[in-house]
Image: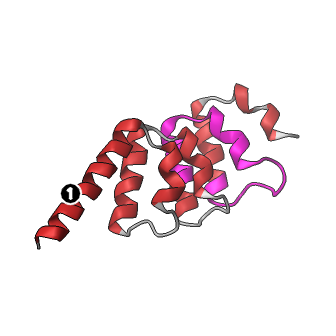
Amino acid sequence: MKLNRMLPFLDDAEKTELVDSIINNDIVEGSISIMEVVPFLEEEEVDRLFKAALARVIDVNPISFLPFLNKDAISKLVKGIQSGEVANLTMEEILPYLEADQIKALFQETLDFIKKSKQG
């Protein structure tokens, strides 16, 4: 049975169970693509899959999740990249997924850093 045909009919508990199965690698290979599941999930479940991809628990490029993450999750990702906590993504890779105010804040931080460098 193809799981992707059932996705629109799953309730939240079933979707959570499906995400758990994906993270635990309990899904039969080829039965469903993780990225087929994502559009049907709530933010919390997408975030769990994204974190699993970042930690390399699941074999999916973390960038694939960026269009589905909320602004707060993207902001946390930016901070993680800046602090070095997130090493498998770069700022250049996530720039297309940032909102204008996030890009402006990054630019301002860069300008502030340059000014401090010149003073010290």
Instruction: Report the front residue among 112 and 45.
Output: 112
Colouring rule applied to residues: secondary structure
Quadrant position of the N terminus in the picture: top right
Callout count = 1
User: Which residue: 58% across, 53% down?
Assistant: 63
SS for callout 1: helix
- Amino acid type shown at disc 1: Asp
User: Which residue: 80% across, 56% down?
Assistant: 28
Residue 31, horizontal then vertical, whole percent: 83, 49
Q: Is residue 54 left or right of residue 112?
A: right
User: Which residue: 18% across, 61% down?
Assistant: 115
Quadrant position of the C terminus in the picture: bottom left
User: Which residue: 40% across, 62% down?
Assistant: 81
Quarter location, residue 17: top right
| Residue at the bottom extreme of this rendering | 120
- In the image, residue 31 sits, relative to residue 80, either above or below, namely above
Q: Is residue 27 left or right of residue 73?
A: right
> Is 37 part of what is drawn in magenta?
yes
| Residue at the top extreme of this rendering | 9
Instruction: Report the front residue among 68 and 18.
Output: 68
- In the image, residue 84 sits, relative to residue 1, either above or below, namely below
- In the image, residue 87 sits, relative to residue 38, either above or below, namely below
> Is 11 part of what is drawn in magenta?
no
Q: Which residue matches tag 1?
A: 112
- In the image, residue 24 sits, relative to residue 106, either above or below, namely below
Residue 88, horizontal then vertical, whole percent: 52, 68
Residue 107, horizontal then vertical, whole percent: 32, 50
| Residue at the left extreme of this rendering | 119
Q: Which residues are magenta?
A: 22-50
Local packing at callout 1 (Cα closer than 10 Å; few below 14, some 14-19, many 20+) is: few
Residue 7, horizontal then vertical, whole percent: 72, 32
